[in-house]
Amino acid sequence: MKKIIFSLSLILLAIVAHAQKSKYLVDEYGNPMHYSVAAKFSKCNVFLVVDSGTKKVTPFEYLNSALNNIVLLNGATSIELESRIQKDSLSFYRYSIIENDSIILKKDAIPIKVKYKWGRGSILPNYVAVDLGVFNIVNKKIEIQIFNIVGKKRVSSVIIYNKSLVAPRSLSFELLRGNSSEKIKANRHLIIDENLKGMRISMKNTDFNILYAVDVDHIDTHSSALLEPKWKLIEGTDMIIGDVDVANFVKPGKYVVSVYPKTKAFGYWKNKALTQSLRFIVEKPKESFFTSKDFLKGGIIGGFCGLILVLILNNRKKRAAKIIAQKLQEKEIAKLQLDSVRSQLNPHFLFNALAGIQNLMNKNEIDNANRYLSKFARLTRNVLDHKELISLTAEKTLLDDYLQMEQLRFGCQYIITASSDLDVENIEIPAMLLQPFVENAVKHGIAGKGNDGKIEISFIKQETDLILSVKDNGNGFDVEKDYAGLGLALTKNRISLLNSIYKETTFLLEMKADANGTLIRITINQWL
């Protein structure tokens, strides 16, 4: 009888433990998912655990704001917050919790409730996980502020948002000329002159304005600029305004200005249902020279006209220098964003490669795992190299190493070719441009075909254009659909950023797929 009671006790304990785990959103091992939601490398960290009914968790980073981070939730009911702090330093930390911008749930509280400790031999020796509280998050916005009292100015601030985002409402656009403004309607033809300062965008105030971005697309050059205006509330109204500098649409051609809330970590991704746009056309400016009717006639008129001309030319020169400086600044910002994308792409690729090694070891294919690891070592050195541009020869070597590794797992066949008139040693392209598409072709195209699977990679010269292609004989996929694969999403975002840097040499991405396979083609115009 005692044995039966003991067995029932164990079963009850197991049921309680399972229920405790299942109330959270968990990882593949059944452990609660801990999302790091403070800024990267912040000394005042915040971790988030959500309930199992949560449909989506989207943390943002590197926002152009005073906030360290923003997290979007979908379908969450409750959240648990914690921070990891050295146990001897707990008394130096304070945190506050604010609900819906006005309700203060905690004010400069000291983190004292310890959930668990790390031992000396662990990855965080002498650290503890402190409980910052459990909160109802249904249709709410919660802000967490945490800081060390030694340096209170360095406050880490995180907003967790569990409301439905809405499309911009009561949206209007105005041209700013000197001290006046003029409303602009769709398909308007504009002439850019020296009096035009920029464009003012007005819309209804939201409780999360910082997440609304503006994307200026120049259709003719396939280039775009992602902007984060400093939205300002118009006093006495429920409207906000944000200004776009004229430098973003000085080139003649067709433009589309889109206003939308960012719902993914990649700012260039737009939810069409939440996006409002304006189309207009910029015409070539007409040259004009101005004279004064008030100047004295005679010999001095020429002198005055000359002086005015010099002043006009000098003013134009300064304005041109300002526009160039602004473009250089935009290019530097795009490069920083590109570096951020690459910093996410490299760990993603390395993680997948390590998963391949683990797969071979789990199958007890030790020799193949060792050969895979040898290839992986050289590949790691190339991937972690921070060069933005590498030669076609170096790109071929990287793809060779990767595909030889995948041959050990899937037994597929591949071929890499280049046009005979291409100088593969001296022609450079952005590093790891093709690798995510090759990886996608292996894993989602030919992985199940064994030796019948085939991948063809080619570098082709077409006059002054360079064409890079990846073709497989897999089952194809819906190219119009957005997939959750991080490598493919990062690469699309990276190509958009490359277009904002190399505006004279546009990158065009084409994807075609059917039951006979998939073809990915990247055309780099005017590259050779």
Image (tube, grey):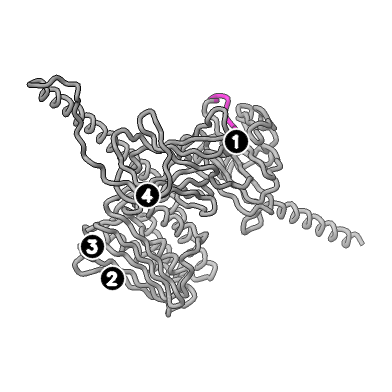
Do the residues bearing badges 2 and 4 touch, measured as CB atoms within 8 Å?
A: no
- Residue 113 lies, in percent from the top left, at 70, 35
- Residue 495 lies, in percent from the top left, at 37, 55
Q: Which residue is mark 2?
A: 417
Q: Which mark is residue 85?
A: 1
Front position among marks 3 and 4? 4
For image coordinates 57% across by 44% down, the residue present is: 71
The range drawn in magenta is: 143-152
| Residue 126 in the image: above or below residue 473 | above
| Residue 270 appears left or right of 309 | right
Quarter of the image with the N terminus in it: bottom right
- Residue 233 lies, in percent from the top left, at 53, 31
Q: Which mark is residue 255?
A: 4
Do the residues bearing badges 2 and 3 touch, measured as CB atoms within 8 Å?
A: no
Q: Alpha carbon of mark 1 to alpha carbon of mark 3: how far?
A: 52 Å
Q: Which mark is residue 424?
A: 3
Check residue 150 for magenta coloring.
Answer: yes
Nearest to N terminus: mark 4 or mark 1: 1
Q: 509 or 189: nearer the eye?
A: 189
Question: Of the residues shown, which amino acid type is indicated by label 4?
Answer: Tyr
Check residue 5 for magenta coloring.
Answer: no
Do the residues bearing badges 2 and 1 touch, measured as CB atoms within 8 Å?
A: no
SS at mark 4? Answer: strand
Q: Which mark is residue 203?
A: none
Nearest to N terminus: mark 2 or mark 3: 2
